[in-house]
Image (spheres, rainbow, N blue to C red):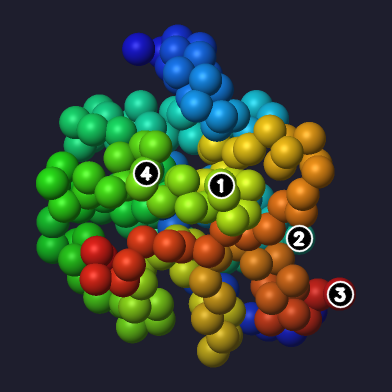
């Protein structure tokens, strides 16, 4: 598997976010995530600026795999970006 | 209110309107837990799949059931989260697609 840097912005309550985390776990893909809803004040604002740069709509999950941005739990696109068949 | 009570209460009200909980009970209960979490955090049941601003006026459109549920269930058989679906969707009589976000970008 290629060495991909996986980072995602999620909500702790969101079904699509949970499904994405589960998918990465099951595929043994290491990833970083931030549950944006659990942040408050300036910290939340700063992270939302980062999310907006990747996804102006600020919907969740917003996933960054290498240089590719995937909005939502799109399994096929995620697999392709990771080089998984 | 606990999640079972919320489930029973909403099921009765929403089924009468033609909206059904997703037959995947694990998913449904997780989303209902999210609604309870949002009620505790923000004071209103904001959609668990969207980031609430905490301002009830600004987020009126995403108080569950959100205003986008009607067109989403009509077009895709499911709301954005997958909490509410049509009978046909639950009976696998229509494809299960990833429902796109319908909330306008200016609301973010």
Q: If the image is split into quadrants, where does the N terminus of chain B sit?
A: top left
Query: Would you say the residues marked 2 and 3 are in contact, meaning their CB atoms lie under 8 Å apart?
Result: no
Q: Nearer the observer, disc 2 or disc 3?
A: 3
- Mark 4 — residue? B66
Q: Residue furthest right?
A: A85
**Residue on which the image places disc 3:** A85
Pointer 1 indicates a residue of which chain?
B
Label 1, label 2: how many angstroms apart (C-alpha)? 31 Å
CA gap between label 4 and label 3 equals 36 Å
Does A35 sit left or right of B12 as displayed? Answer: left
Residue drawn at (57%, 49%) of the image: B74
Q: Are marks 1 and 3 on the same chain?
A: no
A79 in relation to B80, above or below: below
Q: Secondary structure at mark 1?
A: helix
Report in which chain the residue with disc 2 lies: A
Between A45 and B96, the residue placed more toward the observer is B96
Look at 44% across and 28% down and name the residue there. B33
Give the CA distance from mark 1 to mark 4.
Answer: 11 Å
Whether pointer 1 and pointer 3 mark residues with C-beta atoms closer than 8 Å, the reply is: no
Q: Residues within 10 Å of mark 3 (few under 14, many from 20)?
A: few
Q: Earlier in the sequence, mark 2 or mark 3?
A: 2
Q: Read off the residue under disc 2.
A: A27
Res B65 label: none
Q: Are marks 4 and 3 on the same chain?
A: no
Residue that carries the numbered disc 1 in the rendered image: B73
Foreground disc of the pair 1, 2: 1
In the image: residue B88, left or right of residue B74: right
Q: Nearer the viewer, mark 4 or mark 2?
A: 4
The spot of residue A59 in percent (x, y) is: 41, 64
Residue lying at 36% horizontally and 61% vertically, measured from the top left: B103
Mark 4 vs mark 3: in front:
4
């Amino acid at each position: 598997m290629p060495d991909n840097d996986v980072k995602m912005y999620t909500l702790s309550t969101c079904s699509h976010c949970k499904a994405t985390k589960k998918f990465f776990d099951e595929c043994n893909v290491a990833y970083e995530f931030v549950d944006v809803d659990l942040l408050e004040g300036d910290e939340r604002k700063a992270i939302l600026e980062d999310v907006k740069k990747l996804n102006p709509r600020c919907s969740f999950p917003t996933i960054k795999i290498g240089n590719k941005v995937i909005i939502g739990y799109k399994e096929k696109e995620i697999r392709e970006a990771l080089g998984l068949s | 209110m606990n999640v079972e009570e919320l489930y029973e209460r909403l099921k009765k009200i929403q089924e009468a309107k033609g909206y059904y909980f997703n037959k995947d009970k694990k998913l449904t209960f997780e989303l209902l837990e999210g609604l309870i979490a949002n009620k505790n955090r923000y004071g209103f049941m904001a959609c668990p799949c969207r980031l609430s601003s905490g301002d009830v006026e600004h987020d009126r459109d995403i108080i569950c059931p959100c205003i986008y549920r009607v067109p989403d269930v009509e077009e895709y058989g499911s709301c954005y989260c997958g909490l509410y679906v049509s009978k046909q969707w639950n009976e696998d009589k229509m494809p299960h697609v990833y429902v796109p976000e319908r909330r306008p970008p200016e609301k973010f």
